[in-house]
Amino acid sequence: MRPLLAASMKMIVRDRQSLFWAMVFPILFLGAFRLFAPDSFGETDLVVSADTSSGPAVALVEALQDVEFLSVEVVPGLDEAGADQLLEEGDANAVLLLSPLSGDGPAEALLLHSIDDPIGSSMTVGAISSVVDSVNLSVSEVPRAIRLESRTAEADSVSFFEFLGPGIVGMGLMTFSTIGLAGSLSRYREEGVLRRIRATPLAPWRFFLATVAAHLIVATAQIAVLVTVAQLLGANLLDGLLWFFIVALFGTLVFLNLAVVVAGRVHGRGAVESATNAIVMPMMFLGGTFFPTAGLPDPVRWFVELLPLTHMLRAMRSISLDGQSLLQQGPEMAVLGAWIVGTFILARLSFRLSDV
């Protein structure tokens, strides 16, 4: 078994271009997103506590209601403790407390929020600040009628790049595992490697086990490289690193099985590349790699919840960003386990050396 594993590793390492891009392609994404801060989307539940009998307060509420992604509810009489309770119970994503306008100075506005999504957090604070500035300009008889202060209701905050780090790691594993293994098996078929293996006493399962094990070893190295680069660029992925690796390898097994399914059902290297891209690209953009899935429309989000990458990234982020353990990822690991079993059965039925 060891010689077979060594031979499989040599075949992977000899394909230097694929190995190079398996490492560099995700790193390019990390570098690009480190330089830019994209906007967010989705809906934020905002509670406004204000005296709506005053002109500036009415103007502020009306302007906030015009913001497309804000769902505004007016609840008079809230204090800071009541706002914290709303946020803790999940009844609101943000609370804006507006004090009555006095003749001595502007009304004080305090914005509290508990938005985990760093993109949505910055988008919400920026939009409300912009609305406050617009209201101040529109109320000509009262210069600077409202003064806004914003702070998070949680001690820990997550930057967009910290959110992005696990997504890029998952994307890199998915593309290398699916496209890499499917392409290798297709090449083995075209070059007659599989026919020669069939003519030997070697059991087919040993060949596939060695091939998958070799790709898992390379995937482990890929995780180590990407985590190191992401950490150097500012994404904190070292918390719960062992559990992070386990979740990543679970997801990698799913994508390796999918690669075998594609290689077994689709013939021709070009057709295999197209088929794997048809699997990888939708998951890359819908599975939460770059942006939170909460901002997707409900029908799309229902579909996204079926994708293995969605649950892989959710578990990885819960471990690295929220400090959770592997035991707390029960639902996500159950979905990944079901995908592993299901895709293994499909792979077993789809790819046979006797069909080569």
Image: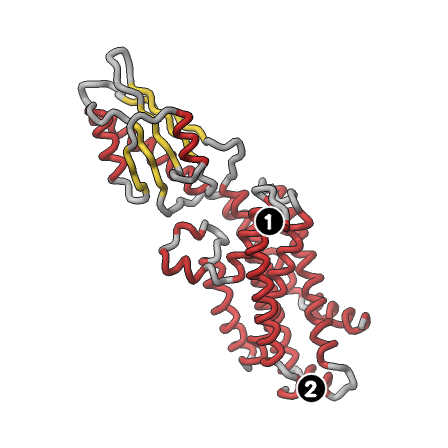
Quadrant where the C terminus lies? bottom right
> Residue at coordinates 28% horizontally, 14% vertically from top-left?
105
Picture quadrant where residue 114 is located = top left
Q: Position of residue 335 (x, y in %)?
A: 55, 61
Q: Position of residue 256 (x, y in %)?
A: 61, 68
- Determine whether, in the image, residue 345 is placed left or right of residue 99: right
> Residue at coordinates 53% horizontally, 72% vertically from top-left?
273
Picture quadrant where residue 331 is located = bottom right
On residue 35, the disc is: none
- On screen, residue 211 above or below 230: below
- Determine whether, in the image, residue 102 is placed left or right of residue 307: left
Q: Which residue is denoted by mark 2 in the rendering? A: 195
Quadrant where the N terminus lies? bottom right
- On screen, residue 162 above or below 308: above
Alpha-carbon neighbours of circle 2 within 10 Å: few (<14), some, or many (≥20)?
Answer: some
Instruction: In this rendered view, identify the residue nearer to me: 142 or 184.
Output: 142
Q: Position of residue 231 (x, y in %)?
A: 62, 43
Q: Which residue is denoted by mark 1 in the rendering? A: 328
Q: Secondary structure at mark 2?
A: helix
Give the label, 1 or 2, closer to the camera.
1
Q: What's the amino acid at mark 2?
A: Arg
- On screen, residue 214 above or below 328: below
Q: Is residue 28 visible?
A: no
Q: What's the amino acid at mark 1?
A: Gln
